[in-house]
Image (cartoon, rainbow, N blue to C red):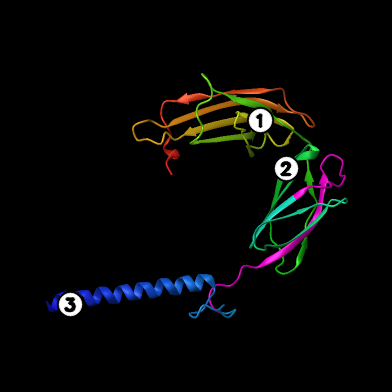
Amino acid sequence: MRDRHLGAAFVCIVGVAMTTACLWTARRSAGTNRVGRRASPGWGFPPRRTGAVSGRVLRADTGAPVQGAVVLGFGAAGELSATTDTDGRYAIAQLNAAACCLEVSCEDQWLASTVAGPFALSPDETTALPALRLSPGGCLVGRLEFPGGKPGRSRGRCSLTARSEASGALTPVSVHPDSAFRTPPLAEGLYTLSATLAIDSGSTDVADQWWEGDAQGLRVVAGRDSPPITIRMRLRPASPPSLSP
């Protein structure tokens, strides 16, 4: 009986110690002290340093400023963006100073998106970046074709990517419910489109489905859409292991 009481006491002590440690770790991560107030600057983990950037967006072919381009960055508050003015200038604050990457797009002017960085910023200051240049681009358009008609997609996950055969860069492409697609503007060159459709049967008695298809050697011409492209989808006999969450 004595040993049983000692064992119960030991379990209680360990439980209290573990609970205290978890609460202390949570408050430390949140930057609060034990009464829930913000901790002093020297207590806990230091806050992430932020900085600001400024610069211009220019056309790669003519050097002309690009008005209306969207410059997207990531900071402590999540995604932050700015739109360029008539002179192609932009400015964004509160970005991660340690490693800042920017994504620039201007799809309505047939310009291919680009990603620049990472840049190391001066904390609490504005860093002037070199000009970001957008190349003229074109779009690939078409649809996915399924033998016997499109399978149900109520539980399906469709993915389509465009891969540059020159650089290997991947661009995600949206697929409409009717299986039609149109890529964002891509830089001139040859591309491969690869599509997959994973359908969860929702039952352990019915096998999941995995469709795939691709089209290679597709040429992008700046300033125009491609002729209609048909990607013929094939049903694989079994789902790959990566489908499992």
Mark 3 neighbour class, 10 Å CA radius: few under 14, some 14 to 19, many 20 or more: few
Locate residue 34 relative to residue 102 in the image: left or right.
Answer: left
In this view, the residue in front, 15 or 185, is 15
Q: Which residues are magenta?
A: 43-70
x then y, percent, for residue 122: 72, 66
Q: Quadrant of residue 19?
A: bottom left
**Is the residue 147 above or below the residue 73 in the image?**
above
Residue 191's label in the rendered image is 1
Closer to viewer: mark 3 or mark 1: 3
**Is the residue 49 above or below the residue 141 in the image?**
below
Residue type at mark 1 is Tyr
Residue 222's label in the rendered image is none
In this view, the residue in front, 15 or 171, is 15
Task: Say whether disc 2 or disc 3 marks the residue closer to the N-terminus.
Answer: 3
Which residue corresponds to the image point at 53% horizontal and 25% vertical from the top-left? 150
Q: Quadrant of residue 216?
A: top right
Mark 3 element type:
helix
> Which residue corresponds to mark 3?
5
Task: Say whether disc 3 or disc 1 marks the residue closer to the N-terminus.
Answer: 3
Residue type at mark 3 is His
> Which residue corresponds to mark 2?
113
Instruction: Report, in whole angstroms, how far the alpha carbon at label 2 lies from the one at label 1.
Output: 15 Å
Task: Say whether disc 2 or disc 1 marks the residue closer to the N-terminus.
Answer: 2
Q: Quadrant of the C terminus?
A: top left
x then y, percent, for residue 244: 42, 41
x then y, percent, for residue 116: 71, 50
Residue type at mark 2 is Ser
**Is the residue 88 above or below the residue 232 in the image?**
below
In this view, the residue in front, 14 or 65, is 14
Pointer 2 with pointer 3, Cβ within 8 A:
no
